[in-house]
Image (cartoon, rainbow, N blue to C red):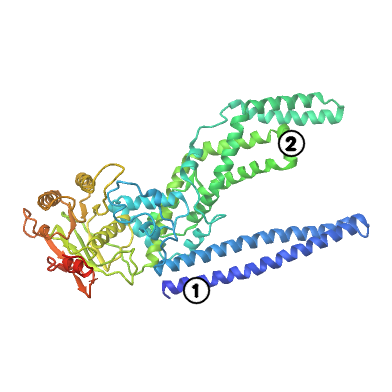
Amino acid sequence: MSVSEEYIQRLGVREAAVRRLEELHARIGSGRLALGAVTAIVAWGALLERAFTPAWLLVPVAALVALVLYHSSVRRARVRAERAAAYYRHAIARIEDRWTGQGQQGERFDIGGHIYAADLDLFGRGSLFELLSLARTRMGEDTLAQWLLSPASRADIGKRQASVGDLRDRLDLREEVATLGEDSRIGVHPAALLTWAESPNRLPHRWLLWVCLLLPLLAIAGVVVWSVWGFVAPLLLVVLVEVGVAHVIRRPLEEAIHATEKAFHDLKLFAGLLLRIEGGPFSAPPLLELVRRLSSHTLPASATLARLSRIVDFCAARENPILRLLNTPLMYSVHVALAAERWRRDHGKVVREWVSVTGEFEALLSLAGYSYEHPEDPFPEFIEEGRAVFTATELGHPLIPAAKCVRNSVSIDGSTRVLLVSGSNMSGKSTLLRTVGINTVLAMAGAPVRARHLRLTPLQVGASIRVNDSLHEGSSRFYAEITRLRALYSLLDRELPLLFLLDELLQGTNSRDRLIGAEGIVRAFVERGAIGLVSTHDLALTEIERLAPGTLRNVHFQDELINGEMRFDFTLRPGVVTKSNGVELMRAIGLQV
């Protein structure tokens, strides 16, 4: 069964479940109304007419309670089925190249000045992040974005590839994660969660616990004295002392309780994810290591969070009318707050590790989903050589629909260090540079790539493709470009060799300065061990000199002018472009040239 057939089949099953549960929901609603009427009749007969003993009232009441609980479970099941169906509709849209605008776009990661993020469409509508991300939490989004924004070490890439291989076919797991939580919106904000977990104790007074244990006992004794001997003064004195203690700690007490309740609202989805990660079972060693990191004092993370869940339930129970009356004599709120503070003291420091594990797992799950949906996309082959290498067969751009994507083979190996790509505007030069760049980003993140085969050394991508002038900053395009080139030059001091992608190099200056500058820039990059692609429609740059023979290789894209219309086949060819149709096109649209 193909991926598309699998998704369509699962979607059909989930949609059938939604219809069945909607019908059941309607029937139960009618049943609740009928059972409510029966209960009212029984209550009337038993309490007003004295037709039979009131004990019979327990039967319809118990049945009504049971039906209400069952109705609640049916509603939850219907919501899960609806969200599962939505998940598969989105998945089908992804593999049919209809996914643009439907997923998480990661605009908050689209920071200005990054050395390739904007150039390679990593974030925003129709971006690589939108295609990849299946994250339900902010930490999952953060981790995936970080993997795309910076290259991993060779060891980390290997671990990610092994984990993706283990998770690739776990479709049930991805569906379960997608339907966790009370709503489908992204949840769990790690900054707020960590602030709560790692903040100082709000109730550090050592005497407070002993007072909270002693005063309720004295209050109970006061009740006994009152009931036996009729003296209420001891009880009133104890209650006054309790009120005074509560007043002294009023602010930290409310802060402790409300902060815990607010934090656990986010923790519900978090706890579900941790429980699912713990449940496995996984075979890849890196995934087993992630599970091992989910513990606190030998307790698994899910069990530790279950304790916090009980504390939050105790917090919510304060709204019970009976507990409202007993709150002060028993110092109930203080005991709940102290329990919450003890939990943070014992386990708060490990929450940061849980956040990290959850982020990594969701990022891996996103890459695994992409791998499953694109089974023809292989993992790249990394090689260890003294010189940088990038050799791809049938390389394609993952953001271009398969029906429109023209694949090309690209090789920078041996003595060749630079490909100079010539051709007219719109012929495919910039797309080729982006294709090379985005596949290298995928490779260095541990993901599959859009190619028949990709063989490369670990590389750091640096691009100058989408560089524009800034009216606000008062800078020209030329100044913005040379500023970016200076930033790329600083990457040459890093451990990984640079893969530079320079589109229409130095087009903002005159031809003479452009040629001199291009020669110097390319030579400086090559001498420092970098490899790359440079595009141009200025044929003068195809004769860059002062490079060792074979260092620069010319390739080009062609175009055809047919009946006044430019036609492109987007196929990369060796050598320099041999013809230009610019003048003919200007004449074709009516310009007098």
Q: Is residue 128 left or right of residue 498?
A: right
The answer, for residue 22, to whether it is visible in the render is: yes
- 10 Å neighbourhood of mark 2: few (<14), some, or many (≥20)? some
Q: Quadrant of the N terminus?
A: bottom left
The spot of residue 153 in percent (x, y) is 28, 51
Residue name at image x 53 percent, y 50 percent: 271
Q: Is residue 305 left or right of residue 490?
A: right
For label 1, the residue is 9
**Foreground mark, 1 or 2?**
1
User: 467 and 313: which one is in front?
Assistant: 467
The spot of residue 317 in percent (x, y) is 68, 43
User: Label for residue 71?
Assistant: none
Farthest residue to the front: give it. 592
- Tell me which amino acid carries mark 2: Leu
The answer, for residue 415, to whether it is visible in the render is: no
State which quadrant residue 371 falls in: bottom left
Callout 1 secondary element: helix
Q: CA distance from mark 1 to mark 2?
A: 56 Å
The spot of residue 63 in percent (x, y) is 77, 61
State which quadrant residue 550 falls in: bottom left
The spot of residue 156 in percent (x, y) is 32, 52
- Tell me which amino acid carries mark 1: Gln
For label 2, the residue is 326
Contact check, label 1 and label 2, Cβ < 8 Å: no
Point out the tag, 1 or 2, that comes first from the N-terminus.
1
